[in-house]
Amino acid sequence: MLHHIVLMEPASAQGLDQIKAAMPILATVCDAVAGAAGFAHGPNLDFEGKSARFTYGFSVSFADRAAHLAYEAHPDHIRAGGMLVVACAGGHAGIFVADLAI
């Protein structure tokens, strides 16, 4: 199983609104992709004080790499990903992604 974790640094308050607008799109992609489950999103509370710049994030689990690749290739994922790049500080630099094998 893979756990896909994405944290974002919004470029502005408007950027945060754009990030939040992308979340229902990503949730729909996860519903459409076999092997994707548990999509969740929300503010990063950063209790340990190690990721303060990344104020919002989401996570989703995949049964395997094939499901993850199907998610990546989905046209709505590509569209939502573009929205996130525009909304984040420094574009891609404002997005942190971790894929954990669990």
Image: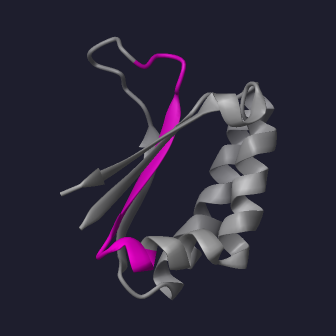
Vertical relation: 7 (above or below) 32:
above
Q: Does 64 appear in magenta?
A: yes
What residue is drawn where x is 76% and y is 25%? 90
- Extreme top residue here? 49
Among the 4 quarters of the image, the one containing residue 98:
top left
The quadrant the N terminus occupies is: bottom left
Relative to the observer, which residue lies in front, 82 or 42?
82
Please state the horizontal and vertical placement of residue 42, each as a whole percent of the image. 45, 44
Vertical relation: 91 (above or below) 51:
below
The quadrant the C terminus occupies is: bottom left
Please state the horizontal and vertical placement of residue 38, each as a whole percent of the image. 33, 67
Give the magenta part as a residue range.
51-67
What residue is drawn where x is 32% and y is 74%? 64
Among the 4 quarters of the image, the one containing residue 37:
bottom left
30 relative position to 24: left or right: left
Relative to the observer, which residue lies in front, 15 or 64?
64
Relative to the observer, which residue lies in front, 45 or 79?
79
62 relative position to 85: left or right: left
Vertical relation: 99 (above or below) 63:
above
Tag count in the figure? 0
Q: How is the image coloured?
A: one colour
Among the 4 quarters of the image, the one containing residue 49:
top left
Q: Does 39 appear in magenta?
A: no
Vertical relation: 102 (above or below) 76:
above
Please state the horizontal and vertical placement of residue 11, each as a whole percent of the image. 75, 26
